[in-house]
Image: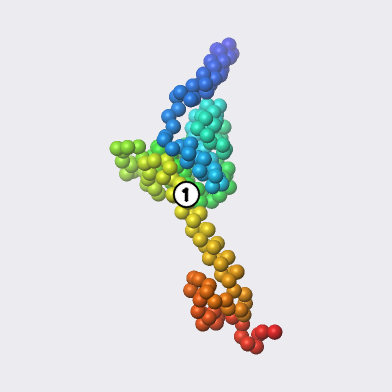
């Protein structure tokens, strides 16, 4: 029992020292802080999933400017690439797996694990490396972290364009009243014959 008590004290001391060393021992990819700020400004939900010790990883995430939830293996009881780790991520975001982009630099722990859990994946490719052919391939490969912004913005852009289309047509005409000049192929009155009421239907 004495040995266990000493080991626990030593482990606690290790946590304390490792947490204090985070600023000196953490390698941050160029553009990481700016990319996180941009994602936050776009109100895109974001979660960190990482292996390691809770106090250290929580401090590391805060140090690089991440303000969202941080899921650490020590807390959730599962380590990447285990399916349970990615299931915890999906549960936290409360989104279907195929609506989640997972970004990581380790082909096996990050990309292959996330892909097998049904997530869409982005591999941050270290210079001069090739992706292992025996692992699930990433959906995208990037060399700079800020490149992920274009990938994330694509579905949002499509959604906004679709919403603009619907709103434009909803405001441009009312049933039975053609408004000249509307776009998207509705500037021909003949094209509205299937939606305009018959003469006998008008009050």
Up the image or down, 125 lies above or below 21; here it is below
* Mark 1 lies on residue: 152
Q: In the rendered view, how is the structure colored?
A: rainbow
| Residue, far top | 2
- Quadrant of image for the N terminus: top right
Residue shown at 53%/65% (left/top)? Answer: 165
Up the image or down, 201 lies above or below 181; here it is below
Q: Is residue 115 visible?
A: no
- Quadrant of image for the C terminus: bottom right
Whole-percent x, y for residue 39 in the image: 51, 44
Tell me if 71 is positioned left or right of 132 in this view: right
Classify mark 1: residues with Cα within 10 Å, few (<14), some (14-19) or many (20+).
some
Q: Is residue 60 visible?
A: yes
| Residue, far left | 128
Up the image or down, 38 lies above or below 10; here it is below
* Viewer-nearest residue: 4 or 75: 75
| Residue, far bottom | 200
Tell me if 126 is positioned left or right of 66 in this view: left
Residue shown at 43%/42% (left/top)? Answer: 146
* Viewer-nearest residue: 71 or 58: 58
Whole-percent x, y for residue 25 in the image: 45, 24
Whole-percent x, y for residue 156 in the image: 51, 54
Residue shown at 53%/36% (left/top)? Answer: 66
| Residue, far front | 181
Tag 1 secondary structure: helix
Count of marks placed on residues: 1
Residue shown at 47%/49% (left/top)? Answer: 152
Whole-percent x, y for residue 189 in the image: 53, 81
């Amino acid at each position: 029992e004495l040995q266990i008590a000493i080991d626990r004290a030593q482990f606690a001391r290790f946590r304390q020292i490792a947490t204090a060393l985070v600023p000196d021992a953490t390698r941050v990819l160029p553009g990481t802080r700016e990319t996180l700020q941009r994602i936050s400004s776009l109100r895109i939900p974001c979660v960190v999933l990482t292996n390691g010790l809770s106090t250290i990883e929580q401090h590391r995430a805060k140090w690089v400017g991440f303000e969202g939830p941080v899921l650490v293996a020590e807390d959730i009881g599962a380590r990447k690439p285990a399916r349970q780790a990615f299931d915890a991520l999906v549960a936290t975001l409360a989104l279907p797996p195929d609506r989640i982009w997972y970004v990581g630099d380790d082909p096996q722990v990050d990309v292959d694990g996330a892909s097998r859990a049904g997530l869409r994946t982005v591999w941050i490719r270290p210079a001069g490396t090739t992706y292992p052919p025996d692992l699930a391939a990433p959906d995208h490969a990037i060399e700079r972290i800020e490149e992920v912004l274009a990938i994330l913005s694509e579905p949002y852009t499509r959604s906004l364009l679709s919403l603009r289309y619907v709103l434009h047509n909803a405001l441009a005409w009312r049933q039975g009243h053609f408004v000249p000049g509307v776009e998207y192929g509705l500037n021909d009155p003949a094209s509205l014959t299937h939606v305009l009421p018959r003469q006998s239907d008008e009050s």
